[in-house]
Structures are given as structure tokens and as C-alpha cells.
Image (cartoon, coloured by chain):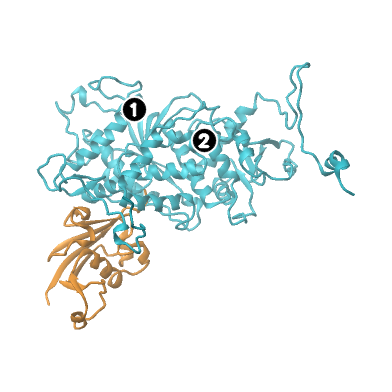
Amino acid sequence: MTTISLRIEFGGGLELLFSNEKRHTLTLPSMVSFDNNSKISADALSGVNLKPADVEYLVFYLRDHLLQERPELFIEGKTVRPGILVLINDTDWELEGEGEYVLQNNDEIVFISTLHGG
Amino acid sequence: MVSESCGNPSVETEAIMSRRPKYDKSKFCIKCKLNSGAIIVRHAVYCKECFPALLSSKVKRILEPQINPNPELSRKKSLKASGNLLVGFSGGLGSTVLLDLISRIYLSHRTEIKKEEGVNKSRGGKDHPRNEPVWKMVSVCYVEVASGFPGMTDKTQKIHQLLQENYESLEFIPIRLENAFDLSWWNKVGGKAALDANTDLTSDELFVSTALNSPNSDSVQKLRSYISALPTHTAIESAIHTLIRILLLYTARSTQSSHLLLGTSLTSISIKLISSISQGGGFSVREEAQEEWNPDSKGAVRLIRPLQEITLKECSMWAWWNDLLVVGQEKYLRDKDGIEALTKEFIIGLERDYPSTVSTIARTCAKLTPKVDAAGLCILCERPLQPGVQEWKSQISMRATKEPSPPSHSSDPSSVLHSLTSYLCYSCHTTLSSRSSKGVSRNSANTSLPLPVWASTHMQGLLVDVPITDMQPNLKEADEEIWLTHKVNPDEMKVAIGEFLLE
């Protein structure tokens, strides 16, 4: 099974939800469960519908594996909470298809909260 | 042809309106048309290289027409303010971005500024008259609110450090929220001596009592008393915004500043407009964007919000791409308490899906003007006071059934009682007299609200020439009809309708 290595960064105060750590490195499988279930084992994957790992899956993965508290401040429905900007390789994710962007090896994904005071 | 679809999205997927694409035309930068886009701003695509010019042009568009004392028709005329500049800094994202942009655009020629690349390169050399500084002196003012909320962290030191590292030539002026109740601060900024005044919030008349020698003159205590007396969380938010704004304005005047800049973004302005209008602030909708403040004609200060066409998203990207450290603002109320917090949640959600709508709020409000002229200024927020506030309120809302009577409490012979109501704008009166929907006053133990020093001074000034008529009617010419109305008590009512009662 191929994997994808990713660099994740949090800004604007969002790092407070992720052990106060701004930078993380992750390895994700290139094919994941269609329903964004990141807790499913590699063997069980063959029995479910798959999709290429995309940003939508990444958001669920982060919630399930890295987020320490208050998931409602990070995720809402199937996407990030309003007020959180996402950059894919220094580019607004709205230009890359948002949650549908298929992750590539060595991609850098940044999550910035705009709600840190004002 | 009659449509056969029922339009119910849970039955027909086509009934859901298709999402409008997030950007118009192509992914290339709309400005240079060469580079690949990096950010979408309200459906327009910009590359990272063209983004700085976009922001600086938006700032200049708002600020520059307001710099010279008189409106300048010729664009070639140089920019020269009549006084100094004060930048309000809260530590939040907007303030941080504002200070960065202002220093790049207007202060980059100053040799002490550390920024090496200015957005605006000075042509003709440093000493060319064209490059003369717009403002002689620039200061940054921070208002610390921590004293009002036990447990909150004081960030003055942290902010001072941040400013010293990045803007060492700018004077740092730290002030505190409790200065609003501090006579020595008031004297320092040129305020006239004010009596200690307290308002009773138990009735809509908002009776004020004054005392020459107040037993409690600690400004922190008064601030906490002020906050605890306010009836709702919404009222607390509004009241604190007002205190901060007025403190900054008086500080601007005391530094001979002709301009006060605040880092309110387009998103924040839209939030404030909706939130303010919902609390009765419609009369001062224009002042939310910009105001010319000169309450006692001692020198005007122009309060301008140069980021008012820049969204929170753009501010965030600017801060990220330029590695700006945002200290952040600690919330003094719990999440989701108060109208402003709810409005913020709504607007932030709206901005993600319908970004143009948020700018429409600000643009529409900018087109509004009140139908009638102001009848002076509100003594609390110093914004235009609309006439007829109490008449309007008496028509639309339930009033207290008990005849309001001045509280008889003080044995101090110098204590004088007046009603504050006619000196407040609709919004401030609502803030002080609102009732929690939960039916129980937030802190019913404390209903005595100390007045900020400026409000007390204004009230004294307004009462000096007016004899205390209390509840007496104004007697006009002898031959004019005088109508005197009074509330009918139950016995009188029985006499009036007695013959119609079935015994």
C-alpha cells in the first residue's frame, strides 16, 4: 500500500488545539475509506469503498488522531469550521478544489484560524 | 410548462441550488494575468506578488481623502495632516495588520523603522519634500481591560515588548479601562473636574445621584461595579467597546493627534453594524465606519478604519505571509454569550459561502443617513443623539407600571437627583435599561452604575443652566391652554367609571 507524507502546520492560535505544536509530519495511506473513517485497519480497507486521500479525509484524520480538545472549534460537518483558512502548498484551498483536492506526496497543508481576536 | 418537481432537497438532489464557483474566470491572477493565483478575495483571484498592492490601495483609498484638514480635490497635492497620529492597538489580528500596513505605506522612510521593504518606495530620496512625513509624531495606544475581569491576564508588558521589537520609533501609550473612572487621568487629558456620579438602573428613568466626596474612589472598583451592574452580556460587550473608543479618542486629543486609526476589518465592521443596529444603534450607523469627533470644540480627531474594505481572510493571509506575530485578544465573556458573539458566528459563516454578502452589509450601511438631525451628543458614547427616544420607546414597549420615583437613599445633603435618560442615545439607553430574556437580572445585587468621568462632566455641563424642575410642568403663557397629564390611581378610576359598574 502506498503512503503519502505530508507537512501540516497550524496558525492563528489553532495550534492550541493540537498540543500547542505548530508543525506536524504525517504519513497517510494513498487510498482511504470513502466515509473518512481513519480508524479502520489496513486489512479491513479492502472491504470498503475507497477514495484517494483528499483534504476532506485529512480533516477527519486530524480530528481523530491529533486534536486534543474542542473538535467543534476545528471541524463542522465534513469540513473545517467557518473562519479557518486552509492553504495547500501556500495556495488558497478554494483554488484547489477545497476538500476534494487529492493529496500528493510532500504536500504542505496549513490551517489558520482567523478568529484569534480582532 | 408547469414544474413537476416539489423542490424538496431530501427527495430530489437537483432541488439543492448548485454551489456557485468560488472564483470567476481562471485561476490566474486577475491583476498581472501572468502568475498563478494564490488567494481568492470575493471571487477575484490574486497572486502572492500582487496581493500587497491590493491591500495598500484599499488602505489608501479609505485613509488618504481624510488626511488633509480640508477635502483635497487634486490628487497631486501632498498629504499633510494637521496633527499627529494615534494608532489604536488591541493585540488582535486587525490591529496587527493595520500597524504593519501603515508603517510600510507611510512610515517606511523613517530610518528607525526596521522594515526593509516598503510597499511604497520613496522617490527622489529621503529628503525630497514629497517624502515629508504625513504626521509629525506617531504613537500606538493599547487599552488593557484585564482589571475589569478577575483572572484575566494583563498583556501590557507583552504588547510593549512586541512593539519595541518591531516599531521602536513609535511611542507606546498604555492605558487601562479603569481610566474611564479615574479623575487624575481625566485631568491629564484635559477633562474638567467631574463629580462622582452613579446611576440607578432599577428604573428606565436612570436616576443619577452625585456626591462631592465619594467613599469609594478606586477606579478599578468602579470599573468592576460598572460591569457587574450592566444587565446582560450584550450590554457588557457594548459598554466596553464604548469605553475603549472614548478612552482612545481622549488620548488622541491629549497627544495632539488629528487622526486615530483602528484596525477594524470589513468582516468586523459588518458584524458591528448588524450587532449595533439590533441594539438600537441605527442612528449612528455612519459613525461605525468613520467619525469626526469634537465633543466640546477643543480640536477634532478623525477616527478612521483603514481596513474597512479588507476582509478578515485577507488580514489573516497578510499576517501569515509576512510572519506577523498576533498576540491575540482574550475573550472576557464565554463563547456565544451576547448578540455580538452570535452575530460574529453568523457573519463568519456567511463570509465563507457568500463573501460578497458581507461587503454588501457595509456598503449598504454606508449609504444610509438619518432622516432627522441630531439633537446634540449622547453623554455616554458621544455619538449623535436622536430626538424623541423616549417617546418612541413608550410607544413600542411595555413600561414599568409603577410610577418611577427617585430613590431616596442618600443622607448626603450635596446629593442631587436627575434623570439620565434624556441625555442618552437610543442605543446607550437600551444598553443600560435592557432586561435579560431569562427574567432574572444577571446580578441583581448591584444596580448602581458609576458614570464614566466624561459622562459625569457632560451631565454637569448640561445641567448648569437648567433649573431643576423635576416633575413640574413647564408653565407657558397665561392665556395658553396647559395640559397636565398624570397617571390615574385606582380610586379615581372607580369614580370615573362607577356608574357603569354592575354592583
Q: Chain of mark 1?
A: B
Which mark is in front, 2 or 1? 1
Query: Residue B25 or A43: which is nearer the viewer?
Result: B25
- Tell me which corner region of the image, top left, top right, bottom left or bottom right, holds residue A15: bottom left
Amino acid type, mark 2: Trp
Q: Colour of chain A?
A: orange
Query: Residue A74 or B124: which is nearer the viewer?
Result: A74
Q: Residue at x 75, y 26 (%)?
A: B483
**Coordinates of residue B397 in the picture (x, y in percent):** 62, 43
The reply to whether residue B452 is visible in this rendering is: no
Q: Residue at x 35, y 48 (%)?
A: B92
* SS at circle 1: helix
* SS at circle 2: helix
Q: Return the disc, 2 or 1, that comes first in the chain's sequence.
A: 1
**Which residue, given by chain and number where applicable, does mark 1 sit on?**
B66
The answer to whether residue A10 is above or below residue B53 is below
The crowding category of the residue bearing disc 2, from other C-alpha atoms within 10 Å (few below 14, some 14 to 19, many at least 20), is many
The answer to whether residue B71 is above or below residue B501 is above
- Kindly give the residue lying farthest to the right in the view shown: B503
Q: Residue at x 29, y 29 (%)?
A: B64
Left or right of B177, for residue B221: right
**Coordinates of residue B14 in the picture (x, y in percent):** 29, 58
- Kindly give the residue lying farthest to the front in the view shown: B1
Q: Who's cyan, chain-wise?
A: B
Left or right of B404, for residue A104: left
Query: Residue A58 or B242: which is nearer the viewer?
Result: A58
Q: Which mark is residue B363?
A: none
- Are circles 2 and 1 on residues that touch, CB within 8 Å? no
**Which residue, given by chain and number where applicable, does mark 2 sit on?**
B186
Q: Chain of mark 2?
A: B
